[in-house]
């Protein structure tokens, strides 16, 4: 570690060693600790932009040429950065980043590297369909390998097994996935000026013209979701624009900071020529210095970083307040088809296509507040519409409102959540019992993920049951009142006849 720090400082980096140190934390790897009290707004370390490793700073893209870089689609997704990291590592001491790359981990606890036995424990969770190992390997064979074989002067055949193998590709991809940041080109004020465009109520913190850098949240096989976004205080009008893969960068020292739910006390900011890690609140001596992953659910934390978060919950026990459960639209369709039996598969497909064209979602997310998305209910009600009402809705381009206002809809929504719960190999009670046993780390993490998801599902089902009972009670009261009213009205009519 000492040689790495020396390398960092010799290339223009600065660390305030009077307030922080890098140490090993049991179960967390390396991290930063405060060695003295740190006030809010204190600069912990800085580094020049040129010390970040990206497709902008590596010489490989220029050596290959812009035409070849685009020909092999290395300008899309993370394939280009992975190849740059492979190439820089192969240069050994000739590479500017040799000390940095040597300091990075080569083994990971993410599901990408799990055995089939361990992966079995993740059945039913949101992790399984997002690991993407096959898609990642397709990028290796379709992009990287052809590019490597086209330039044997840059990628000598004798080095391919050691530096450009599929196994090395996964290691580099996982390094990016777990440690990279999105560092955009400087588009702010001139050096020394303040950025008046960054609003004070923005989630980007303005510090002398700087804007915050966030860590990457994508997957190295995902061209669309490639980074932990930077919030630079601008509007959301450009949200639909494609993010620039060249913004994704490895940031020495900054990537050593660990993260934990709700614990962030430092954030990385960028300016014209430097990046700066600044404390965002007072940090006491002996406390860990935390960056953030954005308070992610355990399913994403495990998939991307190989760990889970457990904190004390307001309702008691431990868990991750950011946990979510995902309900796919095809599960909603399946529940309606099985229980209502009123529509053919062709009719279902027609309505689903229309739903999506009208801007409907194909995945619905339920958080720990247990609020059922109105869009999920709206889709379900769309499938239940009579033919006449369906034609009216389609002609008006107006899907039904997402209201739980009748027992049939509540019953079907409950069935959706029951089907989702049944996707897991065990019950919540069985998982609680398993966690009391001596387990491998992977299995323990998998159980924690599915426990968090099951708690949301069981909570939603309980609320739906209470809602259904309440509506049934109201219906009974109304029926009783109608019955009493009919009886009372009948007696009055009888008396009038007698008169």
Image: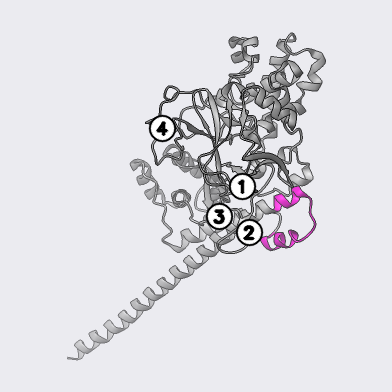
Mark 4 lies on residue = 234
Whichever of labels 1 and 2 marks the residue nearer the N terminus, that label is 1
> Which secondary structure lies at badge 1?
loop
* Image label count: 4
Mark 3 lies on residue = 416
Mark 2 lies on residue = 318
Pointers 3 and 1 in contact (C-beta within 8 Å): no
User: In the rendered structure, which segment of residues is drawn in magenta?
Assistant: 427-447
Left or right, residue 357 beside residue 433:
left
- Rendered location of residue 152, percent (x, y): 75, 10
Where is 149 relative to 284, above or below?
above
Mark number displayed over residue 17: none
In front: label 3 or label 1: 1
Say whether residue 424 is visible.
no
- Rendered location of residue 317, percent (x, y): 62, 62
Where is 406 relative to 153, above or below?
below
Mark 1 lies on residue = 260
Identity of the residue drawn at 17% across and 91% down: 499
Q: Quadrant of residue 209?
A: top left
Left or right, residue 459 beside residue 26:
left
């Amino acid at each position: 570690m000492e040689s790495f720090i020396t390398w960092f400082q010799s290339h223009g980096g600065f660390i305030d060693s009077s307030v922080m140190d890098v140490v090993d934390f049991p179960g967390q790897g390396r991290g930063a600790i405060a060695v003295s009290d740190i006030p809010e707004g204190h600069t912990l370390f800085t580094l020049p932009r040129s010390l970040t490793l990206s497709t902008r700073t590596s010489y490989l893209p220029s050596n290959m040429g812009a035409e070849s870089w685009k020909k092999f689609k290395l300008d899309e997704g993370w394939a280009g950065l992975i190849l740059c990291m492979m190439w820089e590592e192969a240069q050994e001491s000739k590479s500017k980043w040799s000390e940095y790359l040597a300091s990075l981990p080569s083994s990971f606890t993410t599901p990408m590297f799990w055995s089939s036995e361990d992966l079995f424990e993740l059945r039913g969770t949101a992790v399984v369909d997002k690991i993407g190992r096959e898609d990642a390997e397709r990028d290796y064979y379709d992009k990287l390998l052809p590019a490597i074989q086209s330039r044997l002067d840059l990628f000598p055949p004798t080095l391919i097994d050691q530096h450009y193998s599929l196994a090395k590709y996964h290691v580099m991809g996982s390094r990016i996935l777990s440690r990279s940041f999105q560092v955009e080109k400087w588009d702010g004020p001139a050096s020394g000026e303040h950025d008046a465009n960054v609003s004070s109520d923005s989630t980007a913190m303005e510090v002398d013209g700087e804007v915050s850098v966030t860590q990457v949240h994508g997957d190295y096989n995902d061209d669309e979701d490639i980074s932990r976004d930077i919030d630079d205080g601008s509007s959301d009008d450009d949200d639909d624009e494609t993010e620039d893969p060249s913004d994704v960068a490895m940031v020495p020292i900054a990537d050593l900071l660990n993260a934990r739910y709700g614990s962030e006390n430092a954030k990385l900011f960028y300016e014209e020529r430097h990046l700066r890690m600044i404390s965002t609140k007072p940090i006491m001596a002996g406390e860990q210095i935390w960056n953030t992953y954005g308070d992610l659910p355990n399913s994403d934390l495990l998939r991307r970083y190989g760990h889970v978060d457990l904190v004390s919950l307001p309702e008691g026990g431990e868990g991750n307040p950011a946990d979510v459960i995902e309900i796919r639209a095809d599960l909603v369709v399946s529940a309606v088809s099985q229980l209502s039996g009123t529509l053919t598969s062709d009719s279902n497909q027609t309505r689903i296509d229309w739903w999506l064209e009208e801007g409907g979602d194909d995945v619905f997310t339920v958080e720990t507040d247990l609020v059922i998305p109105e869009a999920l209910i709206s889709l379900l009600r769309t499938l239940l519409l009579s033919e006449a009402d369906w034609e009216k809705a389609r002609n008006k381009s107006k899907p039904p409102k997402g209201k739980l206002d009748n027992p049939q809809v509540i019953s079907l929504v409950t069935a959706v959540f029951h089907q989702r719960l049944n996707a897991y190999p065990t019950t919540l009670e069985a998982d609680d019992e398993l966690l009391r046993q001596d387990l491998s780390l992977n299995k323990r993490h998998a159980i924690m993920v599915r426990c968090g998801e099951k708690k949301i599902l069981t909570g939603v089902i309980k609320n739906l049951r209470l809602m259904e009972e309440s509506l049934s009670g109201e219906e009974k009261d109304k029926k009783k009142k109608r019955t009493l009213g009919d009886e009372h009205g009948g007696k009055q009519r009888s008396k009038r006849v007698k008169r």
